[in-house]
Image (tube, rainbow, N blue to C red):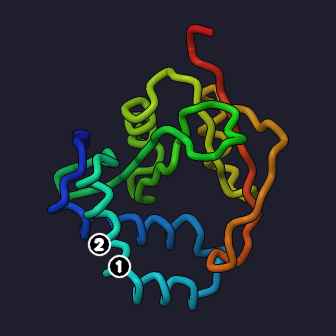
Amino acid sequence: MTIFLREATVADAEAVMRLHMRCHEEAYGQHLPSEFFDLRRQTLPGRIENLEKAIVAGHIPTVACDQQGLVGVAAAGHSEDPRAPKPLELRMIYTLERVYGRGVGQLLLDAVIGSKAAFLWVLADNPRAHAFYVKNGFALDGATDFMDEAWHRLPIVRMVREAADE
């Protein structure tokens, strides 16, 4: 399997948001009711439009592709949170289940944050993601929060890492 990475374009917005939605279903299906995913499908056009605007504004996610199309997406950027433990926030990283364990997540992580100091929020009950981030130098820092009402207030935890050269 050959994977290549590239920056998403406005023309990719629909495919990226469909991938994002499918990854949510695969990763969070056991945590959220089917009505949540029904609503996500209904509101897809607005999320596509928002991504198009974000890309035009310079907030460009990185996508991973194989011969069949998009298999992953990641984005990072300067945090707007005044309490952020690091300036750089990993905002999202998702891959399809069919490429789990094939290095796609690692390629995406390396592309969007490299070895820089960063932080992220992750679902508290997501051992696979926790293990991946620990392998990449992240550690829980004790901060906890909850997703918003739309996400049924699922608990999330913050993970932080120092730069590789610190």
Residue that lies at the very extreme toward the right in this rendered image: 142
Q: Is residue 6 left or right of residue 136?
A: left
Looking at the rendered structure, the secondary structure element under dot 2 is helix
In the rendered view, would you say 162 is above or below 78? Answer: above
Which residue reaches farthest front? 82
**Front-most of residues 31 and 58:** 58
Image quadrant occupied by the N terminus: top left
Identify which residue, 7 or 98, lies in the foreground: 7
Circle on res. 68: none
Instruction: Tell me where residue 97 sits by quadrant.
Output: bottom left
**Which residue is denoted by mark 2 in the rendering?**
49
**Mark on residue 46?**
1
Distance between mark 2 and mark 1 Cα atoms: 5 Å
Q: Is residue 85 left or right of residue 13?
A: right
For label 1, the SS is helix
Q: Amino acid at mark 1?
A: Gly
Residue at 17 percent of width and 52 percent of height: 67
